[in-house]
Amino acid sequence: MPPFPTSSVQEARAALAARLREIRLNAGITGKELAQRCGWSVAKSSRIENAHTAPSDADIRAWCTACDADGQAADLVAANRQADSLYVHWRRLQRTGLKNLQEASTPLYERTRQFRVYASHVIPGYLQTPGYATALMGTIAGFRGTPDDVNQAVQARIRRSRVIHEGDHRFATLIEENVLHHRIGDTEVMAGQLGHLLSSMTLPSMSLGIIPAQAPREQIMWPLEQFTAFDDARVNVELLAAKVTVTAPGELDIYLRAFTRLTELAVYGADARALIVKAIDALS
């Protein structure tokens, strides 16, 4: 199994492998005997037990049956699927279109109280206008070859964004200045999006900081991949090929510390508004 880009996945895989090894040892059988009972090679047993190969649901059930531990299979299958969910390719998440993906994340947005969002590529979803979201999702659908449900997906994203106006939610948002100049859509779309950012700064739930392109980063923090922290329990990282979900406490701490450092680079209030207005002026 190729290395995963986050230790959360590796830790989940290692924990599952350790449980399978414990089950084999408790059954008092060797890896060779397990392989014979399961009808596969000794090498496969070793790869699974050492977390070099991710087992399928069928592999786990066969393992448990061979060790007279059928009662543990369901929990192990669930743990295996949870590990799978920590690193998921966008093509898998978006295979039925973009709308379902927006709706699937709505409960997470509704129950989260503190959002910490670092935007290094595009405007965060909850601050996107319909025009900007349509242009962005249209590009995503075209690049990844997903079903064309962009209009429905945009509507779902706008509905999900109601959390910035409703309930007890707080949004600490950091946007790299370069994002303000990335042309997503035409001039009218970008002007509307940047104007929406200006108005969003006045929301009671919103803390919006812009990191100037010329901010000195030495000894503070270099530009990172776009990520969202949901309370202190989970971070979603957006890679080009996949979404990574970080849940391991040590790794969560890394992202939260990075966010804290990035806040030291940002400007707020009048200075942030000036950078947004500068981006609007550059459209003409």
Image: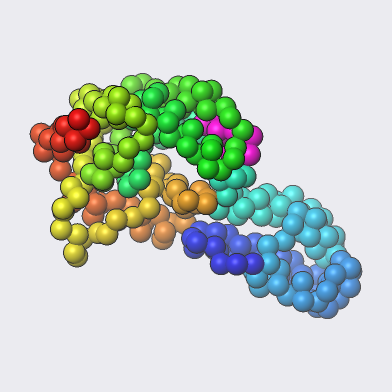
Residue 220 inside the magenta-drawn segment: no
Q: Is residue 265 left or right of residue 88?
A: left
Residue 95 inside the magenta-drawn segment: yes
Q: Is there any visible trace of residue 167 in the rendered image?
A: no
Q: Between residue 220 and residue 142, name the one nearer to us.
A: 142
Q: Position of residue 260 (x, y in %)?
A: 25, 51
The region drawn magenta spans 93-102
The furthest residue to the left: 270
Q: Is residue 242 left or right of residue 163?
A: right
Q: Position of residue 6 (x, y in %)?
A: 49, 60
Q: Quadrant of residue 171?
A: top left
Q: Quadrant of residue 15?
A: bottom right
Residue depicted at 31% across the width and 41% down the height = 182
Residue depicted at 72% across the width and 61% down the height = 55
Q: Between residue 223 and residue 76, name the one nearer to us.
A: 223
Q: Is residue 53 above or below residue 134?
A: below
